[in-house]
Amino acid sequence: MNSNIPVLAIDGPGGSGKGTVGQILAQRLGWHFLDSGALYRAVAVAAVRDKINLDDQAALARLATSMNIRFIPRTDGSAAAVLLNGQDIGDMLRTEESGRLASIVAPLPDVRRALLQKQHSFRQPPGLVADGRDMGSTVFPDAILKVFLTASPEIRAQRRHKQLIDKGFDVNLPRLLDEIRERDARDAGRAVSPLKPAQDACILDTSQLDISGVVEHVHGLLRERQRPG
Ligand code: C5P
């Protein structure tokens, strides 16, 4: 592993702000960005497309190993294009349904193992901001800083609701809240890499903070870690 390349690990449940905060910081630092959730979503979306059963662990692991996935950042700051074997599946990945399907394949140990090496390959100079559930606890245990963002399910549902409405989707807030609770329970309850802060993570509740407040706080923590001596 390229362990001399710094990693900032940002973990937390969906809607905690980790993706937005991670992307802003990656841009500010000039570091690479890994959206690890997109890898799990891509496995699920490709499995449905290829009619692979979501409990066929061996076939899903083969799919995860063989898929060629690339993120192409956009200059206007909007979400990156995601190329799966050359086809842009970015829009397909960002639906609530692909998040739900991702959380069904994510507990499978062979799928997680297959994606581990892919995630490590994102660690390139000058640094990496990695966003997910187990970036600090499992994938990059030597990260220079591990942050775990939280927020109440109600606040996260409201944020998701606004995001989806802004994108023109027709969504129902109470249903979104139920889905968030269901996904939290699945992610926190699984045996392998459950959603929980790494032992040495800084935990930050973002319920009462806006994005720029979280960005500044995390950047401040990173600067402290990078200070020589
Ligand atoms: O972060 P995002 O909502 O895109 O993640 C989708 C799902 O993928 C999560 O609910 C979780 O089940 C899974 N995931 C994971 N480990 C990660 C990132 C995502 O298990 N590092």
Image: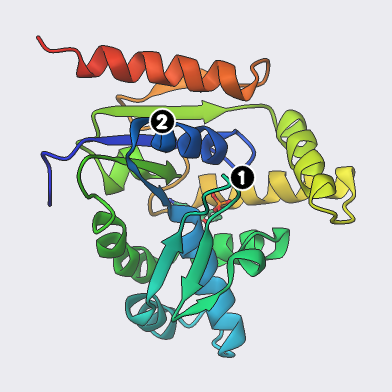
Q: Residue at 48% of width from left, 16% of height from top?
A: 216
Query: 160 left or right of 93?
Result: right
Residue that carries the numbered disc 1 in the rendered image: 184
Q: Residue at 61% of width from left, 46% of height from top?
A: 185
Question: Could one spot residue 29 in this view of the protein?
Answer: yes
In terms of sequence position, does the residue under pointer 2 or pointer 1 come before the other? 2
Q: Residue at 31% of width from left, 57% of height from top?
A: 119
Please state the horizontal and vertical placement of residue 182, each as a whole percent of the image. Answer: 69, 50
Please state the horizontal and vertical placement of residue 83, each as a whole percent of the image. Answer: 48, 72
Question: Could one spot residue 205 in this view of the protein?
Answer: no
Is residue 60 positioned above or below 16 on the image? below
Q: Give yes or no for contact between labels 2 and 1 (Cβ–Cβ under 8 Å).
A: no
Q: Residues within 10 Å of mark 2 (few under 14, many from 20)?
A: few
Please state the horizontal and vertical placement of residue 33, each as a whole percent of the image. Answer: 39, 46
Determine the secondary structure under disc 1: helix
Q: Quadrant of residue 141?
A: top left
Q: Which of the labelled discs sits on residue 173, or is there none?
A: none
Q: Residue at 38% of width from left, 13% of height from top?
A: 220
